[in-house]
């Protein structure tokens, strides 16, 4: 085998091994955050269709033509909150939504005084998994360790954000999200973290 053939063989093997590495890393980077609460919230598309049909029959206040930049939404079981979900979330028209939720069990995990991000690439939702925007990583890097941390465990035991996703997806099937949890912190610390997040956004 001459030197040219040997070089071509080495190059072929190198490219083959690199393509295998890239393929496996692509598979490894897909992570779908599972549902925490499958009793109080919808997990299938037919459930959302049924819920919305019932809410439509009962009546909920529609405000057509409006596009809201921000909304404060409850996150309780649908049987308690009912029409407040579509009334609050139907006018969120943005393709990317930054979701801020409470972190009920943060103290049990020893988490406080820091915004909590996750590393999942998708969140499970009724029609198809909802994509987590790459903007999440940019925000996290800007906030650094001073204001933010990552904990998939915290996100996986918390239901406050997943309650809203089926309704957001019902009104916009192509929505993407940036999920952030807010654990216990003093009002002063909350203002610090809020200002830092606002500046990053």
Image (cartoon, rainbow, N blue to C red):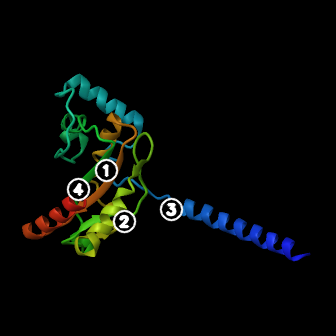
SS under mark 2: helix
- Mark 3 near mark 4, Cβ–Cβ under 8 Å? no
Task: From the image, tell me which residue sits under label 2.
Answer: 152
Q: Earlier in the sequence, mark 2 or mark 3?
A: 3
How far apart marks 2 and 3 lie (CA) works out to 14 Å
Q: Could you tell me which quadrant the C terminus lies in? A: bottom left
Mark 2 Cα-neighbour bin, 10 Å: few <14, some 14–19, many ≥20: few
Task: From the image, tell me which residue sits under label 1.
Answer: 162
Residue extending furthest toward the left: 187
Q: Is residue 103 visible?
A: no
Q: Position of residue 107 (x, y in %)?
A: 21, 71
Q: Position of residue 149 (x, y in %)?
A: 29, 71
Q: Is residue 191 visible?
A: yes
How far apart marks 1 and 2 lie (CA) works out to 14 Å
Task: From the image, tell me which residue sits under label 3.
Answer: 29
SS under mark 3: loop
How far apart marks 2 and 4 lie (CA) works out to 14 Å
Classify 164 as above or below 185: above
How far apart marks 3 and 4 lie (CA) works out to 25 Å
Residue occupying the point 80% across, 73% down: 7
SS under mark 4: strand
How far apart marks 4 and 1 lie (CA) works out to 9 Å
Task: From the image, tell me which residue sits under label 4.
Answer: 101
Which marked residue is nearer to the observer: mark 3 or mark 4? 3
Mark 4 Cα-neighbour bin, 10 Å: few <14, some 14–19, many ≥20: many
Q: Earlier in the sequence, mark 3 or mark 4?
A: 3
Mark 1 Cα-neighbour bin, 10 Å: few <14, some 14–19, many ≥20: many
């Amino acid at each position: 085998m001459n030197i040219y053939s040997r070089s071509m063989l080495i190059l072929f093997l190198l490219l083959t091994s690199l393509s295998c590495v890239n393929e496996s890393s692509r598979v490894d980077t897909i992570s779908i955050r599972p549902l925490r609460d499958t009793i109080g919230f919808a997990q299938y598309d037919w459930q959302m269709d049924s819920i919305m049909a019932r809410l439509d029959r009962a009546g909920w206040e529609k405000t057509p033509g409006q596009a809201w930049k921000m909304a404060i939404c409850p996150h309780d079981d649908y049987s308690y909150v009912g029409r407040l979900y579509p009334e609050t979330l139907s006018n969120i028209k943005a393709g990317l939504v930054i979701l801020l939720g409470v972190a009920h069990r943060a103290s049990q995990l020893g988490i406080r005084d820091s915004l909590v991000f996750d590393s999942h690439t998708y969140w499970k939702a009724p029609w198809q998994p909802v994509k987590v925007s790459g903007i999440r990583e940019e925000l996290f890097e800007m906030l650094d360790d001073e204001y933010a941390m990552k904990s998939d465990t915290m996100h996986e035991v918390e239901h406050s954000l997943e309650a809203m996703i089926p309704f957001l997806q019902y009104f916009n099937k192509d929505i993407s999200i940036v999920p952030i949890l807010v654990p216990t912190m003093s009002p002063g610390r909350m203002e610090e973290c809020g200002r830092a997040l606002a500046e990053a956004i």
